[in-house]
Image: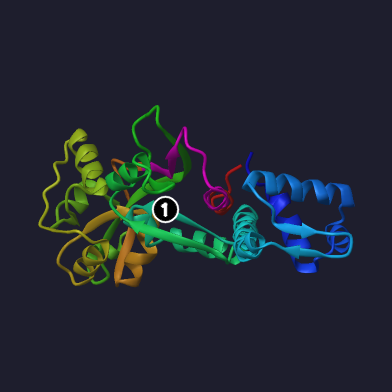
Amino acid sequence: MRMSIKQLRAFLAVAHTLNFAQASEKLNMSQPAMSLAINTLEEALGGQLFTRTTRRVQLTPEGDTFFPMARQLLADWDNTEEAMRQRFTLQTGKVSVAAMPSFAANALPRVLKAFRERYGGINVTVHDVINEQVIEMVAEGRVEMGVAFEPQASASLHFTPLGTDRFVAVVSRESPLAQRGQLSWRELLAHDFITLQRPSAVRLLLEERLNAHGHPLKVAFESHQLVTVGHMVACGLGVSAVPALCESQMTALGAACLPLGNPVIERQIGVIRTRHGQLSAAASALLATFRAQFSLR
């Protein structure tokens, strides 16, 4: 037999009042129920915690030793219960999300702003990593969810589409190309091309799609960061192409963005999570925020 939380509460009530009647009233228990709780606790522990007479109740030496222990146990129990209640009611909590840089730097902040306005007590950790690492981190359980291009069909991963992102041309504002209404890939690739280094999903996707349409991608400059790509284009070193959700970022860096076609290159972006693991309350709330911000039902 093991002691229970009910027995601990009964013990502390009697220990505080040294009166079974008062302790019973405090816990809204009958006196027989209170006596039974103390008796079964003593049986579980193997000895008396109180000496009882018709006139008085006193703690035994063992009861006196147990008193601070019981008080700490009950405090820990109550604190744990409250901490879990706060997590389930989304007053506190923690969630980790991985996102490819193009999404993390552009669309993610507004999602997190909406999330923070509603769930101010939840800590969010963002891992800004390339597309392949997003998928890897989700699959390995290092984050509860990730935002990336749609992966290949998998029995272990679930994909919630947020939208389709189309590539746009990025040129210097001083370039004659900036005055055009739109560009074709042939026109864009006639200039020095700047893009992300492998194994960036953006780079690999462009190479795959352009090769399929007879436009091999010749790269003049490459970088690990989109910010660097944007600065290079803005300075007139060449041209680039980025997902449309990066338009505001490229514009802020001093470049101009134009519609890009022939061929149109686009791909779905969405939230990736494992199929078999249940999301925490905080992660479920964040997923709901993604859906709301992208008007998904």
CA neighbours of label 1 inside 10 A, class few (<14), some (14 to 19), many (20+): many
Quarter of the figure with the C terminus = top right
Residue 243 at x, y = what percent?
34, 52
Please tell me which residue lies in front, 244 or 7: 7
The one of 28 and 92 positioned closer to us in this rendering: 28
* Residue at image location 60% in from the left, 54% down from the top: 84
Q: Position of residue 292 (x, y in %)?
A: 59, 51
In this image, 133 relative to 2: left or right?
Answer: left
Which of the pair 215/25 is nearer the observer?
25
The picture quadrant where one finds residue 136 is top left
Badge 1 element:
strand
Number of marks in the rendered image: 1
The span shown in magenta is 267-287
Q: Quadrant of residue 241?
A: bottom left
Q: Residue at x 72, y 44 (%)?
A: 40
The coloring applied to the image is rainbow
**Which quadrant would residue 90 be assigned to in this image?**
bottom right
Q: Using the rendered image of the protein, determine whether residue 169 is visible from the camera's viewpoint.
A: yes
Q: Quadrant of the N terminus?
A: top right
- Label 1: which residue? 97
Residue 68 shown left or right of residue 162 in the figure = right
Q: Position of residue 233 (x, y in %)?
A: 21, 66
Give the residue at x 76% y 55%: 10
Three-letter residue code for mark 1: Val
Left or right of residue 288: residue 184: left
Assess whether residue 33 is covered by the magenta stretch.
no
Residue 126 x/y as whole percent: 39, 59
The answer to whether any part of residue 181 appears in the image is no
Q: Report the side of 233 relative to 117 (left or right).
A: left
